[in-house]
Image: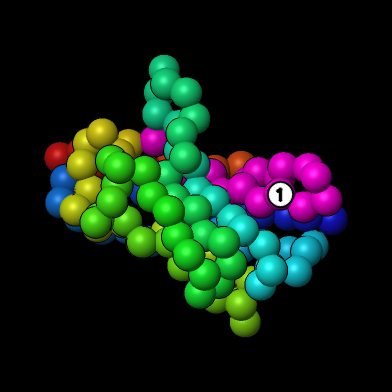
């Protein structure tokens, strides 16, 4: 059974940093492309960052390029999103997603609030 559990969200001041984690189970983590999405209040869910596999190529939304870094740890079956220089517009619920066997699986999300 595929499970994704996000953690690491919280309240941070503008300019601060957070690292989100996505603990994965139920599939071969090292071989899967995984993505981070976010959904701000009143807005549609948007892709933030993607990785083809741990150590593989990455892709970022223009709004987070140079500030966010996606990575993974095969030994821990965990994906990360390092977020630096956070802005109020980064406030959102952040979700991780993986496609396995033709189906998309999502975590329940972790809330990031950037505010002074």
Which residue is depicted at the point 15% across and 51% down? 15
Residue 86 position in % (x across, y down): 23, 48
Q: Which residues are magenta?
A: 92-107
Q: What type of secondary structure mainly makes up the magenta span?
A: strand
Query: For residue 106: magenta?
Result: yes
Q: Is residue 33 visible?
A: yes
Count of marks, rendered view: 1
Image: 101 above or below 78: above
Residue ranking furthest to the top: 42
Which residue is depicted at the point 48% across and 65% down? 57
Q: Nearer the viewer, residue 7 or 39?
A: 39
Image: 47 above or below 43: below
Residue 102 position in % (x across, y down): 80, 45
Q: Nearer the viewer, residue 69 or 76?
A: 69
| Residue, disc 1 | 99
Q: Nearer the viewer, residue 66 or 105?
A: 66
- Give the left or right position of residue 106, taking residue 68 as reference: right
Looking at the rendered image, the quarter that the C terminus falls into is: top left
Which residue is depicted at the point 58% across and 67% down? 53
Q: For residue 103, what is the image quadrant?
A: top right
Residue ranking furthest to the bottom: 75
Query: For residue 84: magenta?
Result: no
- Give the left or right position of residue 38, taking residue 5 as reference: left
Q: Is residue 11 visible?
A: no
- Give the left or right position of residue 109, taking residue 16 as reference: right
- Please tell me whether mark 1 sits on a helix, a strand or a loop: strand
Residue 75 position in % (x across, y down): 62, 82
């Amino acid at each position: 059974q595929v499970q994704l559990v996000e953690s690491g969200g919280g309240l941070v001041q503008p300019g601060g940093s957070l690292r989100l984690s996505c603990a994965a189970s139920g599939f071969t983590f090292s071989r899967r492309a995984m993505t981070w999405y976010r959904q701000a209040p009143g807005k549609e869910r948007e892709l933030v960052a993607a990785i083809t596999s741990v150590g593989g190529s990455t892709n970022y939304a223009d709004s987070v390029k140079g500030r966010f870094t996606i990575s993974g740890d095969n030994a821990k079956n965990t994906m990360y999103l390092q977020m630096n220089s956070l802005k109020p517009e980064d406030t959102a619920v952040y979700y991780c997603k993986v496609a396995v066997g033709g189906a998309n699986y999502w975590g329940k999300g972790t809330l990031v609030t950037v505010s002074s």
